[in-house]
Amino acid sequence: MIPLMKNTFLNEYETKKELVDFILKAKILSMGEKCAEFEKAFAKIQGRRHCILFNSGGSANLALLQALKNLGRLKDGDTVGFSALTWSTNVMPILQLGMKAVPVDCEAQTLNCMAANLAETLKTVKLDAFFITNALGFAGDLSAIREVCKTNGVLLIEDNCESLGTALPDGKTGNFGLASTFSFFVAHHMSTIEGGCACTDDDELDEMLRITRANGWDRNLNFAAQRRLREKHGVKSEFEAKYTFYDLGFNLRPTEITGFLGLTQLKYLEENCNVRQKNYLALEEEVNNNPDLLPIQRGHLSFLSNFAFPVICKNRELRGKYIEQFSGDGVEIRPIIAGNMQRQPFFAKYVKGEWNLKGAEFLHECGFYFGNYPELTEADLDMLKSCLRKY
Ligand SMILES: Cc1ncc(COP(=O)(O)O)c(C=O)c1O
């Protein structure tokens, strides 16, 4: 049996042991020092000014859109494009926050939205923002996408929950838009059990994300920001400030356990991403030699921090056969994320209209994935290679 993932953590035993010690010694377990320490460390590794830790990647997505609305950079009724191939909680907050969600198709060969897909959408719809997803550890031509957004006045934000560590010659995924989000759920590149974050270089957005994360209050802002807000709203005492709520928020806070685990896992992140790339390259050879399968184009990426290994068959019948081949050999598999989002019941319920999403539809019908993680043994890799050989 080769499961989607084997462990909760990188270096499972040491991490659990350190966690037990930490919990026994910690005085406070609600969001505090460890979260702040993690935020600093992650921002540095990602190469962004700010990192804001959340209790999940989906929470980071929700908070990011709410924070942009609080700042007036997005408003009710705005049109937000999203990658047709993504996860449910990338799209749901667009709808939950009263905006229109428009799918942008992806290219089957790259699994991702390319600048040409975005340009095609912009021929018929004016987008206020594009919440792109970098899918399964891959990404589109993000520099060109950034240019198209700039030319057309589209605010670019990235859902990088599946592509931590991937890079293009112009930089790391997650650093191409105004802000980006990450997930630290089990089986992602690093795990805090549940967890996620948002990154940005924008000071105002950083501040608003912290307000949005915790009830709409100012307690997690620096002194200068608190003073500015309190003066603006005539809040005269610390007593009053404690329960003054400045803008729309939620409670999406992580705990100190999230912060602690994040710091532990960050130590192993680079090595983990390297092994994922190495595994991917070894398995990719089998795909290239199998005429039933579509090779994924990744020439525009300078580093592939693969999340899971996509198997794209040339037609639906072949997929049926390969699903049987993998399942029969005990390999756990999944559909290609949410597939063509238009086919999801929640989307059909809330969004009217139909888009021609050829790429996403093809992947929905012909794709699936299996796990790629550092704990895969040579024997596992041999088994996976044999499953990837011609049926
Ligand atoms: C693209 C994408 N966005 C958002 C999420 C949500 O992350 P989480 O499970 O941490 O809420 C996921 C989860 O896998 C994802 O793949």
Image (cartoon, rainbow, N blue to C red):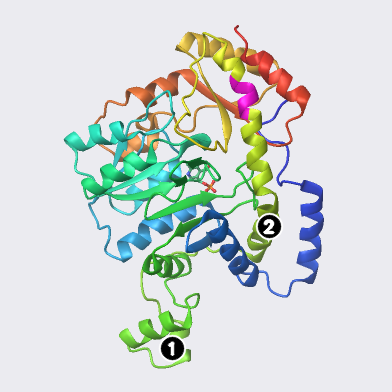
Q: Is residue 54 visible?
A: no
Residue at 61% x, 52% y: name it. 194
Q: Is 93 situated above or below 49? A: above
Quarter that holds the C terminus: top right
Would you call the spot at circle 2 few (<14 residues within 10 Å), some (14-19), or many (20 or more)? many
Residue 54 x, y percent position in the rendering: 53, 59
Disc 2 is placed on an element classified as helix
Q: Which mark is residue 240?
A: 1
Query: Quick one: 56 or 140, which is closer to the camera?
Result: 140
Q: Is 71 situated above or below 274? A: below
Q: Which residue is mark 2?
A: 261
Inspect the magenta stretch and tell me whether residue 388 lies in it: no
Q: Which mark is residue 295?
A: none
Mark 1 to mark 2 CA distance (whole Å): 35 Å
Q: Is residue 232 visible?
A: yes
Residue at 44% x, 29% y: name it. 111
Q: Which residues are magenta?
A: 280-284
Query: Quick one: 253 or 374, which is closer to the camera?
Result: 374
Residue type, label 2: Leu
Q: Are marks 1 and 2 in contact (CB under 8 Å)?
A: no
Residue type, label 1: Glu
Disc 1 is placed on an element classified as helix
Q: Is residue 317 left or right of residue 246?
A: right
Tally of numbered tags: 2
- Residue farthest front in this picture: 169
Residue 51 x, y percent position in the rendering: 51, 61
Residue 223 x, y percent position in the rendering: 47, 83
- Report which quarter residue 351 is drawn in: top left
Q: Say which label, 1 or 2, has the lower sequence index.
A: 1
Q: Is 357 situated above or below 103? A: above
Residue 356 x, y percent position in the rendering: 27, 25
Quarter that holds the N terminus: top right
